[in-house]
Image (spheres, grey):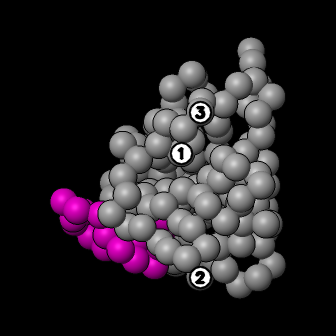
Amino acid sequence: ISTTVRTLWSKTDLYLGYESPYKSLTTFGQPQKTERIGLWDKDVVEAFIAPDAANPGNYAEFEWAPNGEQLDLSVTPDKKDFAWSSGMESVVQVDEAARIWRVVVRIPLKSISPAAPEAGARWRINLYRHDAASHSGIAFSPTFTGTFHTPERFGWLEFRAN
């Protein structure tokens, strides 16, 4: 499997665009009206974002599925807060002829950090894809720990000015 992720930011939002080729899609079927705990058990792309490099164990987790379902939660070393809401928005497109699914996401920066990043700021980030049909997962920065929840192994997102 492979996945391409593109990032873009404005003063108020972070944008992510995923493009994921597939052999077959595995979803929960009809999307729920509420967030689905366990979305990660089927096909999904994810982003884990930690704005404070001194405290990488405090981060936001985001997930998007090919059927349009999404999930966001706040993670600290002591707790996963599934009630937390970032106000994110996403649009999913499945191109069955090309066998690619895409998702474009807008995440309000204020939901991740009280202070908007300036050019040159660096946040910890990891980007993931779980492909249920091939029983595989890929990561921007592999954790080598058996869990995606290893913030000290996240890569870096550097905010650059145009």
* Left or right of 78 in this view: 73: left
* Farthest residue, direction top: 162
Q: Amino acid at mark 1?
A: Ile
User: What range is drawn magenta here?
Assistant: 27-44
How far from the left and from the top, in percent, is residue 13? 51, 30
Dividing the picture into quadrants, the one containing residue 6 is top right
Q: Secondary structure at mark 3?
A: loop
- Identify the residue at image location x=77%, y=40%: 122
Q: What residue is disc 3 on?
A: 115
Asked if one can make out residue 139 in the rendered structure from this viewpoint, the answer is: no
For the residues labelled 2 and 1, the Cα–Cα distance comes to 31 Å
Res. 112 mark: 1
Q: What residue is disc 2 on?
A: 135
- Identify the residue at image location x=44%, y=61%: 73
> From the viewer's perspective, is residue 77 above or below residue 3?
below
Could you tell me which quadrant the C terminus lies in? top right
Magenta stretch encompasses residue 40: yes
Of 71 and 100, nearer the camera is 71
Of 151 and 130, nearer the camera is 151
- Identify the residue at image location x=66%, y=80%: 147
Marked residue nearer the N-terminal end (3 or 2): 3
How far from the left and from the top, in percent, is residue 11? 57, 22
Could you tell me which quadrant the N terminus lies in? bottom right
Query: Within 10 angstroms of label 3, few (less than 14), some, or many (20 or more) residues?
Result: few
How far from the left and from the top, in percent, is residue 155? 79, 55
- Identify the residue at image location x=51%, y=26%: 12
* Farthest residue, direction left: 33
Asked if one can make out residue 155 in the rendered structure from this viewpoint, the answer is: yes
Res. 27 mark: none
Magenta stretch encompasses residue 75: no
